[in-house]
Amino acid sequence: MGFAKMKSLFKMKKFRARKRADISVSLLVIMTFVLVGITFFVFVSDEKKILIKMQNSKLFDVISYEENKINFYINEAIENSINVKDKNNFKLEFIENFKNELKKYEIYSDFSEYSGKIREQLTEDNVQILNNTISIEFKGIKISKKLGNNFVSYSYNKKFEKNL
């Protein structure tokens, strides 16, 4: 075999080797596009599920906000109602002060939908005074919210205690 023939054979092998590399790079590019296409399709097809989950979490955030608002106003009312003048008639005066505090909060906030239910549960039986601690328990206050087609109803139950 002559030198020229060997040189042309070497070029052919080199060309084939380069062509194989081009095929693997082409397959890599094609597979990348296929993978991106599948990912995009899955994302678009699951968009409704993601939106529903986001709405549900927003709905639970709204319920949590309402619960925190009730906790805040009840704690404020207890704090401001403890200053009772007649210690012999403490429960009755405390309940009256508490109801007056609730009325203040109704005027200045969107708390009125819960204050009536709280006021109904303010009875002498529900207010307990033991060992210089006052405790009040509220049960069954319904918090309901709707967002889109989703609806959540929550029964608020909590016991509040405050040192006198």
Image (spheres, rainbow, N blue to C red):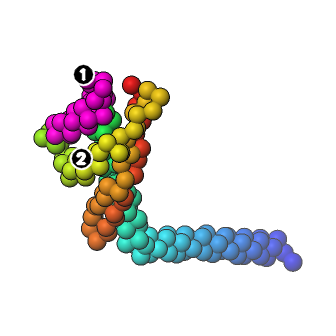
Crowd band around label 1 with a 10 angstrom C-alpha radius: few (<14), some (14–19), many (20+): few
**Which residue corresponds to the image point at 35% horizontal and 57% vertical from the top-left?**
140
How far from the left and from the top, in percent, is residue 160?
Answer: 40, 39
**Which residue corresponds to the image point at 26% horizontal and 68% vertical from the top-left?**
148
**Residue identified by numbered label 1:** 85
Numbered range of the magenta stretch: 79-105
Q: Is residue 24 above or below residue 156?
A: below
Quarter holding the C terminus? top left
Q: Amino acid at mark 2?
A: Arg
**Residue identified by numbered label 2:** 119
User: Image check: 73 left or right of 26?
Assistant: left
Q: Nearer the viewer, residue 94 or 48?
A: 94
In the picture as drawn, the residue positioned furthest to the left comes out as 107
Determine the CA span between mark 1 and mark 2.
Answer: 21 Å
Q: Amino acid at mark 1?
A: Lys
The count of marks equals 2
